[in-house]
Image: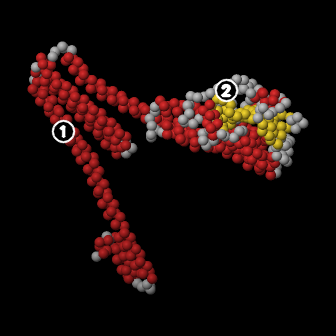
Amino acid sequence: MASLILGALIRLSFSQDSREEIQSESSVIKIRIDPIGLTEDIISVESPKQSKNRFVSFTERFIPKKMLKSSPDLVETSATGFRAATRQWRDANSKPKELAELAGRSSLLWGRTVRRLQIDDDLDGALGALIVCEAYTTNAVATKIKVNTLPSFATTERFLSEFRQLGDIYLPQRTRRNLGQIFFLQLHHANLNLFSDFLQSFTMDYAAPRMFMYDPREVELRRWNLKAIMTDSHLYRQLRSLAAELTATTESLLDVVLALDDGIGENSTRLAVLGAEIRGCSKDIMTRLSRISGDLDHNLQLLRLSKEMSQSSNVQMLTLLATIFLLLSLSAGVLSMQSRFKDLGDLLYDFFGAVVLLAAAVALLVVIMLLLSSAKELESRLFKYHWYKAILRPALLATIFGITLTLGALVLTSFVVGMFKDVVLGAKILGYVIAAAIGALVVIPYTVFMVFWLPTLWEFGGAKKKQSDLEGEPKGKEAVVGGSKDAGVKIQAEPSGSNCQDASSTAPTARAVNQSPEDTSR
């Protein structure tokens, strides 16, 4: 029961942009209410054309002002919520009460059903209720419904079936004191159960099949699935709004009915059980909606994270491309001198030498970038270990910093010496630096293994051996102690003798306790 806010749910093959709605079904329910619940309510279903006399003018109050689009334009005489329900049993000329239901089938032929109802005195003075039911759907779904040849008044019959089924529970609870309140509670309870059934089929037939479109394990964030996420997010928000108003109004009506009860007898117990059932159904509805909305938000966050990581890798590729364009800049610089390659002579060798050197530098940069990426990935796995975070990582960082600083200083020194003093000496220094850098790639891992890993393995092996020795030693001591205890027991069991005999008999036992297992075996 809520404002008409929900657009029709349509099959995946249907166009999501087709939002114009048409009225696919309309019916009028007349209910003659039994005030004390001794007999069942008299219910009849008619089409609007079959209604006569005052019912014709009465139903005209429910007709929208203009053609329906994405959301129908409500007439001013209809109202929603708990306030509209209370006016039905208080005001003489109350406004029609509006309920909204989502009608669904397993074949995804979903639309929305609007019921506008009002309690009024019948022609003979009896209390009666008039409900105008209207079903709205999109053109595509309406065409599909015609192909499937669904029965007329399908949603109305489903609602009345649920209403009659609940009548077995509500009829014994009716009194003249709570007639209007409990009748409205029965109507809202039927609508609540239908909404819960719809959400179950909605989850299985719509939400679950569409989950593949934004599953971060299968797809990336693209424009097509972003559009699907926006559509479903808006739809789930409308469902939550509709469910919140429906559950809140139903529970408020339940509180009113419980307040009117005297709290004595079997009827009070039945009302308490009925209240627990209604609140359980409301909780089930909100839990299911929260779950499908949470799954959508969770997948969207993971898709965003994947998108950000992809953008980060694209930035790295742009950096690499910028480095490669250095070669093109060099070529452009040579060609801008307006010199032919055949006229360059020996300079042509220098030109291609510079190109090869730059290409080697680019390849080296690519390898370094890949190694850094792999190292960061490996470090993220090792960072949870204390030995890496507290010992190995600081040592590696200090070593890398020291080597980089030393090599940088030596390279700078070689160029300074070559520029200002001796080119040969500067070239020798640069050669030694390059040789040291290549050797460091072999020496450093070996040194780290010898300094950090080998002592750890050695200590681990010694601790393992010591632990095995300790596990074997207590068994011998326990045997000796057990033997001494047995000897003491035997001595105490002997007849009374001299003190010297007792001392001589217990002394070996005391010595045996202090002896090792090897001495005892001897």
| Residue under pointer 1 | 439
In what element is the residue under mark 2?
loop
Question: At 49% across and 37% down in the image, what residue appears?
Answer: 213
Disc 1 + disc 2, Cβ < 8 Å: no
Q: Amino acid at mark 1?
A: Gly
Task: Give how far apart the Cα atoms at labels 1 and 2 are.
Answer: 80 Å
Q: Residues within 10 Å of mark 2 (few under 14, many from 20)?
A: some
Question: In this rendering, does residue 450 appear at all?
Answer: yes
Q: Secondary structure at mark 1?
A: helix
Q: Quadrant of residue 106?
A: top right
Residue closer to the observer: 194 or 380: 194
* 314 horizontally vs 185: left or right: left
Mark seen at residue 68: 2
Q: Nearer the viewer, residue 137 or 487?
A: 137
Single out the mark in the foreground, 1 or 2: 2
**Depth order, front residue of 256/216:** 216
Q: Residues within 10 Å of mark 1 (few under 14, many from 20)?
A: few
Q: Which mark is residue 479?
A: none
| x and y, in percent, of residue 100 in the image | 69, 34
Q: Earlier in the sequence, mark 1 or mark 2?
A: 2
**Which residue lies at the image location 83% right of the left edge and 34% below the top edge?**
120
- Seen in the picture, residue 79 relative to 256 is either above or below; the reply is above
Residue 118 screen position, x and y as percent: 79, 33
Residue 132 falls left or right of residue 407? right
Q: For the C terminus, give its image quadrant.
A: bottom left
Quadrant containing the N terminus in the rendered view = top right
